[in-house]
Image (cartoon, grey):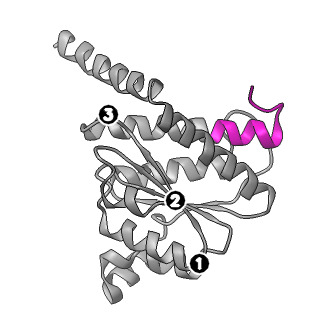
Amino acid sequence: MKNYIKNQVKLSFETKQAIYENEKLLNDIEKVSKLCVELYKNNKKTILAGNGGSAADAQHIAAEMVGRYGFDRPSLPSLALTTDTSALTAIGNDYGYDKVFSRQLEGMGQDGDLFIGISTSGNSENIINAFNSAKDKNITTVALTGRDGGEMAKLADIALVVPSNSTPRIQESHILIGHIICDIIEKEIFGDGVS
């Protein structure tokens, strides 16, 4: 069993190594971080959504923005569209589950905000619909995916595609990427910047 555990850790290392060596992905993470810094300086917000484990990731990243990541500082506006059970169940009941995020974006998203849709496959229909709603409102879209990026990578303004076909490895890497973005935002706005 210990060898199995070690192999799981090794597979996680290998995925992170693939990210480390992927210049396009690193450049896109930097681009998203800079966009977030600028939108926060202009009193806009980040909005996130995902299903299942990706819903938890959306909430985790939003909480880092609203609360804190590495040090005490003023709160930043960030919203996970996965937390309001009344809205989710009402929209799901009245319009269908594929509209649970797009309908919320229609009501709460504003020109200049940034929407991060999280899906390991990149093919979650409710996230794809949210991307379409975001475009209608001039909201920048970021796909946080894996595998080949799926349909989301084609629709998003920026696609952060983890180079893996393994759902657990993709999810682990999504949190790594989310943490890097949070760290850069915090240091650029409230700290000494990132060198």
Residue pictured at 48% horizontal, 64% vertical: 83
Is any part of residue 28 visible from this angle? yes
How much space separates mark 1 and mark 3, taking CA atoms? Answer: 33 Å
The numbered mark, 1 or 3, whose residue comes first in the sequence reads: 1
| Quadrant showing the C terminus | top right
- The residue positioned 38% from the left and 60% from the top of the image is 154
Q: Which residue is mark 1?
A: 137
- Which residue is at the far bottom? 94
Q: Is residue 2 above or below residue 36?
A: above
**Nearest to N terminus: mark 2 or mark 1:** 1
Asked whether 195 or 169 is in front, the reply is 195
* Nearer-the-camera pick, 2 or 142: 142
Say which element carries label 1: loop
Location of residue 143 (image quadrant): bottom left
Magenta span: predominant SS is: helix
Residue 56 in the image: state x and y as whole percent. Answer: 42, 51
In this picture, residue 82 sits left or right of residue 38: left
Q: Amino acid at mark 3?
A: Arg
* Amino acid type at mark 2: Asp
Residue 176 is covered by the magenta coloring? no
**Residue 72 in sight from this viewpoint:** no
Q: Is residue 25 above or below residue 78?
A: above
Residue 175 placed where, x, y %? 47, 39
**Residue 169: which disc?**
3
Q: Amino acid at mark 1?
A: Lys
> What is the span of residues highlighted in magenta in the rendered image?
182-195
Residue position marked by numbered label 2 in the rendering:
157
Label of residue 64 in the image: none
